Image (cartoon, grey):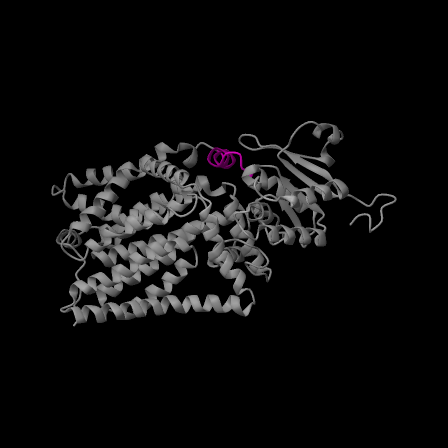
């Protein structure tokens, strides 16, 4: 017979029995404080220009709302749910940096609420749960994990937290339906970003291990684990079957499988492992610099939980390590580390609550509480003043992303929006989908990121080039944007790049330069032909990284055949 598992330690029981945040007034005052901190930390970064990934996910979301399909009309190597989350965003908010980030922060606040419920269910202690919420409010905003970007890693946190909440409830309340629901939300997590599979292994272990410990015999343990695995897998497979079935019904199951799985494996094979390790260590140090005490308490609390002689140790054994491991696949970027935010919040919140419980002198408690609040809040503010205050959104984007044309994309989009009707397609030779998002115009090609076309690492890269060239020829877009930056084109000199020669010849034959742009700090400037009488003389001899080409009007003597 399965027995109920007690998750609350004696210290938390003592704390929860004392008056304080359990009373209505204090409870809502503390939530007001958490909400205020959450909002104030995000006001400054709200208008930071979108990066490539944000633009890409948003553009595919727009494509979905136009009746298109991921992997057919707009291609990207991520699972599909992030595109549909972005589609939901644009049903209620505009495709601007402010709109995207408002949606992100509202979505992220739901994650905070779920983590609070996890902590409350796990410890039966209001104080511990409130500390978890506060830690997440601060840590999830930090630039070290790119808390200002609407990345797949930020979006997977809500379904992951829901999966973990159901796992905790299934152990504490012995409700098997929670195991099924945990698998259901686990599938939503996986289909938002594949690397979350490592974190989901922890969720499954969290369901199984306490049940094994509570079993009275090996046979009972085997039956309990088998039942739990079956129910969790049932929830996971239900969602997965619906997703596979949908793309199969749409006739693109092969492309769906290729871009969701096969392309990612090909991508990872070409990585320099030493560079990956170096980048990982550098970003981990940035996280430590922005929250030294918080990270120390989180790691210490995780180890402490692991040594406890009750089922609370299962929260410490795996979540933080597997979350860190989930950030390893790929080249490693700061936003990969957003996946550790739930683990840091839970372990850090539990640790701070336990520290304060040890303070027996009631007169010293307010001071200790203030010290803990400031120790969590001040390090990121002091480490990154240009992020939280003092720097313009454009200036921070240039400081954080270097020579990527994210601030300039807004001006390029404004120029294109004024020049083109709403249904006119655009071709961007480069990887700047945020321009398409801002203009709300479609791309004439399904390849809106150039790197799959530029490297023989991908066996189909010539096929991708040919498809793109055919689509550009067929559409004959009125405007073509060329971003002459390695970070945007990701040229591989080992590859056959004849498509670039074809497009170059097309531009020489049928297009003229309509605008050029610079990359400056905090933001470059766009120079348009219709604003400069000596435009042709101005652009001679200078290598501008941004060119906007406009289809020339037919010239005397031109024939349709001659312009093909």
Towards the viewer: 558 or 478: 558
Towards the viewer: 250 or 189: 250
Q: Say above or below: 98 vs 546.
A: below
Q: What is the quadrant of residue 500 in the picture?
A: top right
Residue 177: % across, % down? 30, 70
Residue 502: % across, % down? 69, 45
Q: Residue at x 66, y 37 (%)?
A: 547
Q: Residue at x 43, y 59 (%)?
A: 191
Q: With 274 as the anchor, is 218 left or right in this view?
A: left
Point out the image quarter for the N terminus.
bottom left
370 in the magenta segment: no
403 in the magenta segment: yes
Outermost residue, right direction?
Answer: 557
Residue 270: % across, % down? 47, 45
Residue 468: % across, % down? 64, 51
Q: Is any atom of residue 2 visible in this view?
A: no
Q: Say above or below: 139 vs 122.
A: above
How many numbered marks are there? 0
Q: Say above or below: 329 vs 226.
A: above
Query: Principal SS element in the magenta part?
Result: helix
Towards the viewer: 72 or 292: 72
Q: What is the quadrant of residue 22 in the picture?
A: bottom left
Residue range of the region highlighted in magenta in the rendering = 392-405
Q: With 162 as the anchor, is 440 left or right in this view?
A: right
Q: Say above or below: 121 vs 290.
A: below
Q: With 106 as the anchor, is 560 left or right in this view?
A: right
Q: Is any atom of residue 469 visible in this view?
A: yes
């Amino acid at each position: 017979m399965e027995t109920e598992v007690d998750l609350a330690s004696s210290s938390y029981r003592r704390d929860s029995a004392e008056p304080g945040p359990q009373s209505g007034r204090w409870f809502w005052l503390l939530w007001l404080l958490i909400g205020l901190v959450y909002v104030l930390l995000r006001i400054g970064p709200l208008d930071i220009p979108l990066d490539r990934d944000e633009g890409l996910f948003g553009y595919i979301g727009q494509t979905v709302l136009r009746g298109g399909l991921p992997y057919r009309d707009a291609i990207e190597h991520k699972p599909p749910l992030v595109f549909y989350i972005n589609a939901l965003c644009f049903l209620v908010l505009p495709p601007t940096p402010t709109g995207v980030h408002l949606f992100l922060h509202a979505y992220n606040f739901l994650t905070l609420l779920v983590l609070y419920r996890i902590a409350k269910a796990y410890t039966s202690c209001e104080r511990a749960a409130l500390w978890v919420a506060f830690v997440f409010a601060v840590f999830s905003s930090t630039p070290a994990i790119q808390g200002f970007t609407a990345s797949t890693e930020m979006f997977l946190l809500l379904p992951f937290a829901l999966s973990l909440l159901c796992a905790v409830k299934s152990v504490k309340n012995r409700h098997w339906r929670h195991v099924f629901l945990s698998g259901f939300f686990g599938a939503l997590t996986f289909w938002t970003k594949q690397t979350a599979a490592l974190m989901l292994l922890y969720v499954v272990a969290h369901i199984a291990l306490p049940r094994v410990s509570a079993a009275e015999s090996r046979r009972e343990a085997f039956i309990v684990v088998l039942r739990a695995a079956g129910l969790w897998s049932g929830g996971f497979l239900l969602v997965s079957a619906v997703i596979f079935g949908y793309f199969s019904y749409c006739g693109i199951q092969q492309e769906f499988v290729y871009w969701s799985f096969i392309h990612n494996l090909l991508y990872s094979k070409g990585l320099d492992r030493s560079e990956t390790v170096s980048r990982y260590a550098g970003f981990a140090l940035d996280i430590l610099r922005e929250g030294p005490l918080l990270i120390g308490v989180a790691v210490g609390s995780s180890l402490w939980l692991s040594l406890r002689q009750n089922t609370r140790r299962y929260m410490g054994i795996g979540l933080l390590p597997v979350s860190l491991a989930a950030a390893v696949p790929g080249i490693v970027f700061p936003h990969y580390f957003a996946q550790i935010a739930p683990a840091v919040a839970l372990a850090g919140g539990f640790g701070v609550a336990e520290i304060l419980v040890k303070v027996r002198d009631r007169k010293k408690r307010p001071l200790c509480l203030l010290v803990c609040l400031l120790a969590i809040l001040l390090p990121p503010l002091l480490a990154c003043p240009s992020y939280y205050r003092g720097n313009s959104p454009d200036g921070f984007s240039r400081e954080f992303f270097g020579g990527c044309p994210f601030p300039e994309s807004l001006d390029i989009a404004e120029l294109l929006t004024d020049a083109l009707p709403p249904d006119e397609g655009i071709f961007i030779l480069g990887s700047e989908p945020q321009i398409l998002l801002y203009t709300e115009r479609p791309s004439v090609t399904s390849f809106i990121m150039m790197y799959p076309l530029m490297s023989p690492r991908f066996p189909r890269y010539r096929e991708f080039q040919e498809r793109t060239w055919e689509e550009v020829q067929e559409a004959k877009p009125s405007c073509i944007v060329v971003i002459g930056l390695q970070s945007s084109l990701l040229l591989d000199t080992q590859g056959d790049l004849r498509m670039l020669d074809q497009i170059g010849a097309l531009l020489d034959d049928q297009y003229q330069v309509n605008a050029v742009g610079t990359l400056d700090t905090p933001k470059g400037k766009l120079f348009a032909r219709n604003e400069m009488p000596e435009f042709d003389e101005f652009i001679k001899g200078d290598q501008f990284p941004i060119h906007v080409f406009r289809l020339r009007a037919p010239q005397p003597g031109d024939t349709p055949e001659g312009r093909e």
